[in-house]
Every structure is written in structure tokens, then in C-alpha cells.
Amino acid sequence: MQDVRCTCCDKLLCRTIGVVEIKCPRCKTINVAERLERHEPKVTHDRYKTD
């Protein structure tokens, strides 16, 4: 889960998973946040591979 804070006044706006566009009730700035899944490349080692 990701905390979404206003880029202008740093007020906590919501906690979400996914894409959100929200207007800050304090300073009226429109904030867009997108949660990107971190996919790390898997390292595989084939010990028994013969060339």
C-alpha cells in the first residue's frame, strides 16, 4: 500500500494501491499517484548445463 501525500503541502491524502488522482482539500492542488509494481529480474543459475 502506498501513502499519497500532496506535492505542495505534504498533507496525507489517502493510502492506495493502483492509480489515483486526488485534489488536496487544504491547498487545492491536484495530485496524481501511480503505484508501480517492482519486478526484479530473477537470476537463475543452471549448475547442470553442459555445452
Image (cartoon, grey):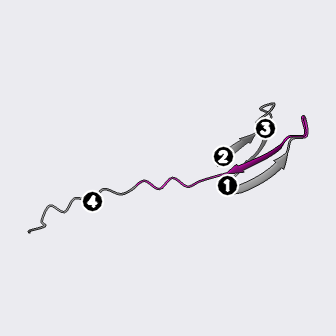
Q: Is residue 37 above or below residue 48?
A: above
Q: Main secondary structure of the magenta part?
A: loop
- Residue type at the position of mark 1: Ile
- Residue type at the position of mark 2: Gln
The quadrant of the picture occupied by the C terminus is bottom left
Quadrant of the rendered structure where residue 48 is? bottom left
- Residue type at the position of mark 3: Cys
Task: Please name the residue that numbered disc 1 is placed on.
Answer: 17
Task: Please name the residue that numbered disc 4 is placed on.
Answer: 44
Q: Secondary structure at mark 1?
A: loop
Dot 2 or dot 1: first in sequence order is 2
Task: Please name the residue that numbered disc 2 is placed on.
Answer: 2
Asked if labels 3 and 1 touch by Cβ distance under 8 angstroms, the answer is no
Whole-number angstrom distance, CA of label 4 to CA of label 3: 41 Å
What residue is rendered at 22% in x and 59% in y? 45
Place of residue 40 in the rendered image (x, y in percent of width and height, measured from the top left): 42, 53
Task: Please name the residue that numbered disc 3 is placed on.
Answer: 6
Whole-number angstrom distance, CA of label 2 to CA of label 1: 6 Å
10 Å crowding of disc 2: few (<14), some (14-19), many (20+): few
Place of residue 13 in the rendered image (x, y in percent of width and height, measured from the top left): 80, 42
The part of the chain drawn in magenta is: 25-40
Dot 1 or dot 3: first in sequence order is 3
